[in-house]
Image (cartoon, rainbow, N blue to C red):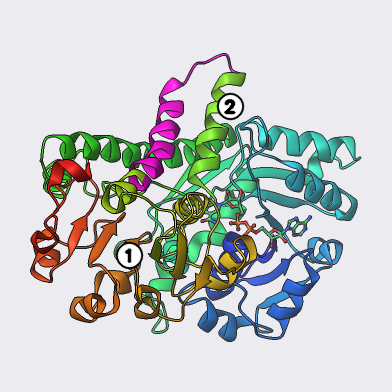
Amino acid sequence: MSKPVAICVIGSGYVGLVASVCFAEMGHQVTCVDNDEAKVKTLREGGVPIYEEHLPELLGKHLGRGGDFTTDLSGAVEKCQAIFIAVGTPQGDTGAADLSYVEAVVSEIARAITSYKVIVEKSTVPVYTNEWVRRVLHRRGVEPDQFDVVSNPEFLREGTAVIDFLHPDRIVVGAGTERAADLLRSIYAPLTGGTYYERPDALPGACSAANPAKLLVTSAQSAEIIKHASNAFLALKISFINAVANLAESVDADIEDIAAGIGLDSRIGPKFLRAGLGYGGSCFPKDVAAFHWVAQQQGLDFQLLEEVRRINDAQKDVFFNKVRAALWTLRGKKLAALGLAFKCDTDDIRESPALDVIRKLLEAGASVTAYDPAAIERAKAVLPPTDKMVYAESLYEAAKDADAVLILTDWKEFGQIDLAELNRRVRFPIVIDGRNLYRPQVMADHGFTYVSIGRPANYNAQQGKPRQMLL
Ligand code: NAD
């Protein structure tokens, strides 16, 4: 059994909260700090502020028993050996990451340091942030032998965040000293040594005692770039398949067959080859922009990243045009929108393509009735309910009297619709699927006009609409 480490995690958002409960699950003593008093109160009272599988059970298991929440950053820093910074790094006006939250936290840490600490960048940050953190600490009078700065980027995905954290593909540690690298090694030892996976209460996943998590030690700069480059590459894969989808559609080929054929190449792999509305969320859009900015700062013209972004933005227009082509005019039309979150299994609506599409439809004069299994409350804060923007309790309620049903998020529930019931609810049996959740033949068999991404549209013969009129 490795020795428990006293860990402080600053920020209790998607990353900080998951990291906190998972470190506690691994046997460490964790204090999670947030300056949002309401959030800390909710957490202390046993509430769960975000929708994430396994989070409620782990919070219940560790709250007050190895896991604690506070707004007192100084107190937490004082009693901990490792301080993980997991605050937001949103996109700034220039595309660069806004590091003001990180800087504010580092300044506060500087005031609280009285003994050696390892300060860990968990937030996604541009290369050389470790150097800036070091400088800020130094300028605020912290002696160089009182701290090390380590980059330990996080690769979890919302929706599977807890399992991703406990069963990572890899753990990257960018450290300039062996002392700091060793502390990180001991923090992750339950995963890299496999002892966590031997426990009867371990959450199951891809790693095991025989195949434990791998930890890669690099320089801090390399670790920072690994994170940006990973996200940029995944975004690139999505934009690539969307560009191929648009080509496929124009020649009556099927992107699902094409993606299967590409993905079976072991050098490429099947993941992130799902054609659709494009990527969104709090990471890919901002990280692609930030990585592009980083390259520009070094005098490099990384145009590929600009193209990745352009294809992604255009994909929402591609979908919008499909809706218009299927319905002719949009003013006064009643549309059922299935999905608000940027992807399935999360309530996160940041940079959600679903919301972008809904906004465009509202601007075009349509009215929208939306349903999402988890994201309605968050969506209401940015798209308040009106007579044109209505929120439904179920997908069938949303579909009632709809001129068309739009699938905007890849929730499992939306791929398992009772199609006969859906057909009874709608005014016209038209489904425009931005996530390719159905086989066109299945939709045709249920009497639907079915339009998807990168596949020939399938028009309901009974409606007698010739294809060329609709494109
Ligand atoms: P988030 O917005 O959900 O959470 C950030 C938290 O930090 C908030 O609770 C906020 O109140 C808190 N905070 C801000 N300033 C603070 C301060 N001065 N003191 C204490 N708390 C403070 O953000 P997130 O989605 O968890 O992302 C955090 C970082 O992790 C970002 O850099 C992001 O790019 C990166 N990341 C995110 C994901 C993801 O899927 N969300 C995955 C990998 C990496």
Above/below status of 414 relative to 137: below
Element class at badge 1:
loop
Task: Give the quadrant of residue 290.
Answer: top right
Residue 256, percent from left and from top? 16, 50
Q: Is residue 35 magenta?
A: no
Element class at badge 2:
helix
Above/below status of 317 relative to 444: above
Per the model, the C-alpha gap separating discs 2 and 1 is 46 Å
Task: Give the quadrant of residue 21.
Answer: bottom right
Above/below status of 42 relative to 388: below
Which residue in the protein does label 1 denote? 403
Q: Which mark is residue 10?
A: none
Which residue in the protein does label 2 denote? 294
Q: Is residue 422 left or right of residue 456?
A: right
Residue 34, percent from left and from top? 75, 65
Identified at 26% across, 40% down, the residue is 241
Crowding at dot 1, Cα within 10 Å, few <14 / some 14-19 / many 20+, comes out as many
What predominant SS class does the magenta segment belong to?
helix
Q: Quadrant of ligand 1?
A: bottom right
Above/below status of 470 relative to 36: above
Residue 315, percent from left and from top? 37, 41
Q: Nearer the viewer, residue 276 or 150?
A: 276
Q: Which residues are magenta?
A: 298-320
Q: Is residue 335 left or right of residue 26?
A: left
Residues at circles 2 and 1 in contact by the CB criterion of under 8 Å: no
Q: Is residue 308 magenta?
A: yes
